[in-house]
Structures are given as C-alpha cells and as structure tokens.
Image: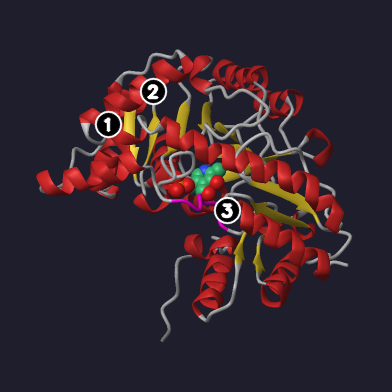
Amino acid sequence: MILKPSARAAAVAPFLVMDMLREAATLRAGGEDIVHMEAGQPSGPPPRLVVEAAQRALATDKIGYTESKGLPALRERIAKHYAETYNVTVDPAQVVVTTGSSGSFVLAFLAAFDAGDQVALTSPGYPAYRNIFNALGIEIANIATNATDRWAPTVAAVRELVDGQGLDGLLVASPANPTGTMLKPDTLAALALASAQQGIWFISDEIYHGLDYAVPKATALSTNHDAIVINSFSKYYCMTGWRIGWMIVPPSLMRTAEILAQSLYISAPTLSQYAAIAAFDATEELEQRKAQYAENRAFLLDALPGVGIDEFSPVDGAFYIYADVGRFTNDSFAFAQRMLKEIGVATTPGADFDTERGHRYLRLSFAGSRGEMEQAISRLKIWLK
Ligand SMILES: Cc1ncc(COP(=O)(O)O)c(C=O)c1O
C-alpha cells in the first residue's frame, strides 16, 4: 500500500521559482554560463559588519537556543528601527524574531485565523501566502487588480470586500512581489484603517522596505496599531540564507505568537540573530547595493522595450519587473524553460504569482550585477528577434 500525503498538503501548489532556481543551478554546475534573473535575492554578500558580528558571536557565545521571541538585544534594536525610520513606537515585547519572514507568515496566520476563516489578498502576489493559507485550510478572497492600476488594490475594491460579509483579514505587500508596485502612503493608510474599522486583521508584508525608487515607504503601524507587520533581513539587508526575519504583533497576540514559536521552531537561528543586530548599522554599504539595483532598474526599463518586452508596470520598489510577454507566448512556463535552455537566461514564469493570468507574464529579477543585466539584454535581443 502506498501511503498518501494529506489532502491539505496536496492542495499546496509547487513554488515554481524554486524549481527554476534548481534547474538553473544544475545547468551552472554543468558548466553553463547562466544569467540569474529568477531568484529574488541580492547577488552580493551580507554587509561586512554582519559577517564580523557573526564571527564575534562564534568566538564568544555557545550559540544555544534563545528565548522564543528572539534575543532581547535584537528585539530592542528592531523596536528602535521603527522609532528611527517611521517615528512609530513599538514595544520590544511586540517583536517576534522568526526564521525568515516565511516563519512569520506561519506564526501570524496560525495566531490570527482559524481553519475556514477568509482572508483577502491580491493576485498577482507572492505565492507562499496562498500556499500557506491552503495548507492551513484558510479561505482566500481575491482582490481584483489589473495592469492599468499597476496591479495595486484600489481602496474602492478593498472597501467593497471589507464592508461585505465574512472577511477575517486582509493581507497586502508594499513593495509587492512580483510587480514592484508600492501603495502610496495614503492608500496603505486607508486600507489599514478600513480593516481596523471593520475589526478584521490587517497583515502588512513590508519585507521589501528600504528598496524603494519612486514612492516613499510607509508602515501600516502608523495608522493601525493592531496591524501585524512582517519584515525580514533577507532583501534590503542581503541575508537570505541566514533565515532571519521578524514580525510586530499587537499586545493581544504577543503571548499567542510566543507559544506557537516555542513549539514550531523553539527559536530563530542564534548566530543569525547576533549578526542581524549589526545589520542596522550597515546603512552605508546597503545603500550602495540599493544604488546598484536602482541602476539596473533604470538600465532594464530603458533596454527591455528594445528587445520587444515593453509591457510592464513601473517598478516603484523591490527588484522585479513583471512583464507581459503575451506577444511571444501563451505559456510563460514553457517560454521561461526554453529561454533557460537556449540562451541561459533564468527567469520566473508568472503562473507562480497569478494562476489565472500569469501564463502570459514573466518576472525578471534585477538583483544581480550590471554585467548580468547587460548579458541578458544582448542574449534576448538575438533570441527574440
Ligand atoms: C513578498 C515576499 N514576502 C516574503 C518573502 C520571504 O522571504 P524570507 O523568508 O527570506 O524573509 C519573499 C521572498 O521572496 C517575498 O517576496
């Protein structure tokens, strides 16, 4: 007899970007010259101060467990970050340090929702939200978005959903993955307030904060003190593999989140926690990285139309371009695979982010080097001619 996975697990879709990442890595290991535009991760190392802090911790600490919500020194530093960056007061007791922001999603969703609850989110969007909701038996309500609105949820569309019946939560991301779209501060405030007025959870994924090029960043905590705010050291701080992130929860969830963390993962990686404290002091180095992404962004926005890829939203933040490649294909998964095999340019098919319309979209990450961006354009120019 073959034992089967649970129906809940079977309902979880594969995360195609991770499959593309594996294929691209296999080709590279076989000696192929691959341009990586699939991965949503900085190409450079973590800041020097972070590495030094990790080395110091290795030399002086036994690297045991920490308390489940994280090292007090890190939680204090994160709370200070909110005061410095957004002028918002956060009690260190509200900070929960997790294994990447991915760990925060599981904790937050378990802490706030029961199976059968309904949460609204946009499509296209980051696939793990949907996959984790499916795994936990939480229902999803789609917020209609379209390319002409830069894929951003409009206040009217959200109000209609929120004021209707039965919603238990609303989740937004700004800057968003895969579109790079940011909500203007007053739009974010309106959505956060609508949720507060209706008495439903507002979850704000702020993991790409720091990587903004056109719109100022704002935190949901400025308008909704009960918001659950999720952030990470992966993107701006260049620490993807250190698996460290955090969330800010309202006092009513502090103990619940702690209890769940105790049993789900005990504590986030201790070495990474020590290192992360130093990340807040590495602004000079991190701003140089950001300047490199900004240059890549400007280069691609200018060069892509020249190779026939000319329909994409404006990229306010993060490091992605979500491009309509419908003129070349109706199956962007097959298209991305051919592109990888034939010219060694790895991208992510849109189906990861939007199961209905994603088949004509590709996500291109510009977190790599300028040389990689130039390579991609010169290969695409010949391939798409
Ligand atoms: C919008 C968004 N949220 C969360 C994550 C998860 O990142 P991590 O678990 O490394 O913090 C990602 C990763 O790409 C993302 O794009």
Neighbour class for label 3 at 10 Å: few (<14), some, many (≥20)? Answer: many
Q: Amino acid at mark 2?
A: His
Neighbour class for label 1 at 10 Å: few (<14), some, many (≥20)? Answer: many
| Span highlighted in magenta in the image | 39-44
> Between disc 1 and disc 3, whose residue precedes?
1
Please name whichever residue, 195 or 80, is drawn nearer the observer in this view of the structure: 80
Q: Is residue 283 visible?
A: yes
Q: Amino acid at mark 1?
A: Leu
Count of marks overlaid on the render: 3
| Separation (CA) of disc 1 from disc 2 | 10 Å
Neighbour class for label 2 at 10 Å: few (<14), some, many (≥20)? Answer: some
The image quarter containing residue 1 is bottom left
Taking the magenta stretch, the answer to whether it contains residue 76 is no
Q: Secondary structure at mark 2?
A: helix
> Residue 276 location in percent, x, y?
32, 38
- Toward the bottom, the furthest residue is 1
Q: Circle 1 sits on which residue?
A: 74
Q: Circle 2 sits on which residue?
A: 81
Please name whichever residue, 127 or 320, is drawn nearer the observer in this view of the structure: 320
> Residue 270 location in percent, x, y?
22, 45
